[in-house]
Amino acid sequence: MPYPLRIDSADCLQNVGLRGIAGRPVFPTALEIRYFLSLLARQARRQRVRVVDYAILTNHVHLLLWSMTGEISLVMQWVEALFVRRFNVTLGRKGALFERRFYSNRIDDPRHLRNLIRYFAFNPVQAGLTPHPSRYPWCGAFGILRGSVPAWQTLRFHTPFLENGLSQGKSLAEAWDQAFGKPLSEQERLALEATLRDPVPGELEWRNLLARATPAARQKLRQAAWRADGRPAAPAVVHRHEAMRFLQSRRTWLPEPPRTTSRGPRPDPGTSAIAGVLRDLAGVSYADLSRLLRISDKTAVKRYREHRNAMLGDNPYSMAWFELARRVLDSCGLDKDYPTTPDTLS
């Protein structure tokens, strides 16, 4: 079943949103948020869109865009492509970042528009990121309440709601607070959130299937998604480059897990032990592991699985690997609290 066609035309108002795949953070720091806003500002300077309101949270973004030329799809495609490319290069990951195509809904009802502006302003408050919109710099209300509206943001669609307060001699911040300063009720919020997404083809069938799955099956799906997304295997105990520097100087005596088949000497001896150190101690992802060891992603996964399987029993490899781990931690000044039995990592 295909996605529904977008309804877009010149000089129309669009509610646009993006959400990170599997709910992962897509704006972990202020640098990513600033870069995303700079991309929107470039499109505003080209007179293709203007930002009416916005709210950027850790794993999703809400935008209220004035589509000036009816090219909302081209604008968002350009913004997404540049943002994802930089994000992946910076963090050394691959693949999709957002869960699906951006959703968009045309806004024609003034009451719906007012509720959207209120929702955007208080969404960070509801998420526990700030006590008030005036203290959260990544939402459209912040600039209005602080009296520093950026050049790429327009108040054209706010004006009808602000006229009453401004006519009474109130400041812009006071007029905004009078028009939009009350959070949505629970009923209003739920009704509004139901309109914030396009129906996803097959989503209902997938949710019903997932609901019938066992907890173990759901956990396995989550782990598969983490591996595909390049999520680190464990919290980093040592820095990856310090660990690699030590391992490269000791490569001649790295332990090797027992092999199930005999096909001659391994072309990359010691790689399984290095993969274990980098994943379990430095917390690197499979993507980073393949880059550091200069092997393919498939080989990186295979070598780490060989290490984990060998660590399940009391054998020469596991004992030698724990001695190696202690030496790595000792070289980084952290040789105090690491476990000494394989059971703790199984």
Image: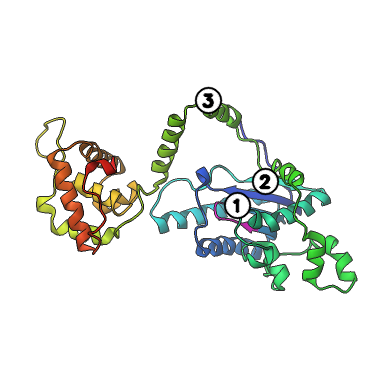
Q: Considering only order in the chain, which callout, 3 or 2, is on the residue closer to the N terminus?
A: 2
Q: Nearer the viewer, residue 307 or 44?
A: 307
SS at circle 3: helix
Q: Considering only order in the chain, which callout, 1 or 2, is on the residue closer to the N terminus?
A: 1
Tell me the chief SS of the magenta region: loop
Tell me the residue that label 2 is attached to. 104
Amino acid found under the numbered disc labelled 3: Arg
SS at circle 2: strand
Residue drawn where x is 65% and y is 66% of the image = 45
Mark 3 closeness class: few <14, some 14–19, many ≥20 residues within 10 Å: few
Amino acid found under the numbered disc labelled 2: Ser
**Coordinates of residue 11 in the picture (x, y in percent):** 76, 54
**Coordinates of residue 261 in the picture (x, y in percent):** 14, 30
Tell me the residue that label 1 is attached to. 76
The region drawn magenta spans 55-59
Q: Considering only order in the chain, which callout, 1 or 3, is on the residue closer to the N terminus?
A: 1
Residue drawn where x is 84% and y is 60% of the image = 161
Task: Quadrant for the C terminus, please.
Answer: top left
Query: Which label sits in the foreground, 2 or 1?
Result: 2
Task: Quadrant for the N terminus, please.
Answer: top right
Tell me the residue that label 3 is attached to. 212
Q: Nearer the viewer, residue 293 or 206?
A: 206
**Coordinates of residue 252 in the picture (x, y in percent):** 9, 52
Mark identifier at residue 18: none
- Quadrant in the rendering for residue 318: top left
In the figure, is residue 32 to the left or right of 110?
left
Rendered position, 3 above or below 83: above
Query: Which label sits in the foreground, 2 or 3?
Result: 3
Mark 1 closeness class: few <14, some 14–19, many ≥20 residues within 10 Å: some
In the figure, is residue 290 to the left or right of 325?
right
Rendered position, 187 above or below 87: above
Magenta stretch encompasses residue 58? yes
